[in-house]
Image (cartoon, rainbow, N blue to C red):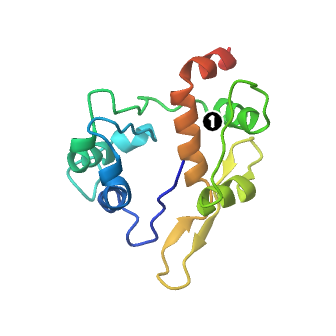
Amino acid sequence: FDEICLPNPRNTTPKLCYEFIKKYGVKVKRGGLFYYGDPSGRKRDTRQNEHDYKIIKRILSKYLNNNSDRVPYKHPPVLKRKDFANNIFEGVYKDIEFIVDSKCKKSIADFEFLKEDINGKKSKEKTTDPVTKAVYEKYGHTSDSYDYFITEALKRKFKQEMK
């Protein structure tokens, strides 16, 4: 696994897609790409006339097939997905191993430094970029993407564990 985390102001869906093409385009066979993510990305973006996944479909269309969209239509429960993710990292499931490549600096930092709030959910503290003055959540995004990936890619196991 790899990560593409673009800094502000390049942290947009179109720019991410073009970065993906630049990095992997020739390596991906037609119809060989799957994408996972946050179901709220299906809502129309107020800055544009299309939502994130329509942008992905438009820009990456030559790499996609009818089964490429792996985004669920509703969010998996936060506490259940957190427990499932932690169980994978702790080796509870002997048939699942998830290895984070050392070059995934943002993901590693997210896994190490994201805090839990008093309700057991993720505490997404805001911070301000000293140069751009943009306010953003320092941690939580890459671990959210991991959660959405594992709960969908390992859907049977996740549903079994939710019982």
For label 1, the residue is: 78
**Amino acid found under the numbered disc labelled 1:** Val
Horizontal and vertical percent for residue 102?
A: 65, 58
Relative to residue 8, is residue 14 depicted above or below? above
Give the farthest residue toward the bottom: 131
Horizontal and vertical percent for residue 43?
A: 33, 42
Horizontal and vertical percent for residue 143?
A: 61, 48
Residue 117 appears left or right of 160: right
Q: Residue at x 74, y 25 (%)?
A: 93
Quarter containing the C terminus = top right
Tag 1 secondary structure: helix
Residue 134 appears left or right of 24: right
Relative to residue 18, is residue 133 depicted above or below? below
Location of residue 108 by image quarter? bottom right
Q: Residue at x 46, y 70 (%)?
A: 7
Horizontal and vertical percent for residue 109?
A: 68, 61
Q: Residue at x 47, y 59 (%)?
A: 4
